[in-house]
Image (cartoon, rainbow, N blue to C red):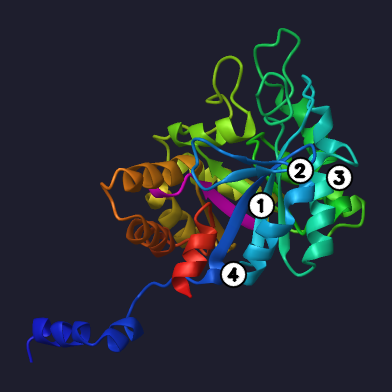
Amino acid sequence: MFPEQRTRRLRIKPALRRMVRETGVSVHDLIYPLFIKEGESIKEPIDAMPGQFRYSPDRLSSVISEVVSREIPAVLLFGIPRKKDKFGTEAHKKDGVVQQAVHRIKDAAPDLLVITDVCLCEYTSHGHCGILDRDGGAVENDETLDVLAKVALSHAKAGADIIAPSDMMDGRVGIIREALDESGFEYTPIMSYSAKYASSFYGPFREAAGSAPSFGDRKGYQMDPANVREAMREIRLDVEEGADIIMVKPAMPYLDVIRLAADEFDEPLCAYQVSGEYAMIKAASAKGWLPEDACIMESVLSIKRAGADMLITYFACRVAELLS
């Protein structure tokens, strides 16, 4: 029998084709990101991300019900406070917007995993991910670490299941791990944005969260898109400091990095299909240039095929619906 004949026969029957498929996507792989805006009775559409909204904590019930009904296991929360200052003070308030949302979600759906993003960019008046130096021109790495630890601890106290630092400050995983352990949260995992690139694909997110930097850019602390070996070093450092789950962000432009990380590390690997990836598919499908559902599934499949164990995606609810 010629090999091509054997392969052809395997492709003919749909049931057999599914059985020999090398890569699969499951609803249990998915994490749904949510934007939480301080206030009441808020459900605002996000122009750059059609189908996505900013929710106030009191308006979360409907979207959480949908997530649970779709059997999506986790959500990732980003906070948008009323007030911002140069120190990101609102990020670690006991009754901050994310802290309120965590309480409400855990009351409504105790088994849903709540992951909280730990960064200062949504909370600082200058839009950078850390505390600036006296001249206001550069982020002070070490001064930022103490604030990040306070934010992480406040989220854990509110009931967050997983802490996800995304700031890319050096040493932040170790500082957060120490703060959690000392306060009795030694079993709260850290999902670290270990290889977060200074990407052009974050634009819609920055509109959604109001987190664009007021000057300069984030290339001083996020990764150069040209570098792969550096990503492996960054991931290794995070693992040594106590990261339980590692992440590559964005996903599709960095499938090679995902593959290399999957081959090199044993820790669970998450990939983030970011706002720009979402917006491109939505815009092209709205024009009739691409079939939306087919592109959604092909894109998430490519990320899983590259080696990701779990996937943060704004398409999570739609993927779950298509899988069902």
Mark 1 Cα shell of 10 Å, populated few (<14), some (14-19), many (≥20):
many
User: Which residue, given by chain and number where applicable, does mark 2 sit on?
Assistant: 41
Q: Amino acid at mark 4?
A: Arg
User: Which residue, given by chain and number where applicable, does mark 1 sit on?
Assistant: 76
User: Which residue, given by chain and number where applicable, does mark 3 sit on?
Assistant: 154
On the image, the x and y values in percent for residue 20 come to 32, 83
> How far apart in space, not on screen, are marks 3 and 4 (Cα)?
29 Å
Observer-nearest of 140 and 166: 166
Direction left: furthest residue: 2
**Is 318 drawn above or below residue 198 in the view shown?**
below
Q: Amino acid at mark 1?
A: Leu
User: Which residue, given by chain and number where applicable, does mark 4 sit on?
Assistant: 70
Q: Which residues are magenta?
A: 245-253
Mark 4 Cα shell of 10 Å, populated few (<14), some (14-19), many (≥20):
some
Q: Amino acid at mark 2?
A: Ser
On the image, the x and y values in percent for residue 191 come to 66, 53
Q: Is residue 82 magenta?
A: no
**Is 120 drawn above or below residue 180 in the view shown?**
above
* Mark with earlier residue (1, 3): 1
* Mark with earlier residue (2, 3): 2
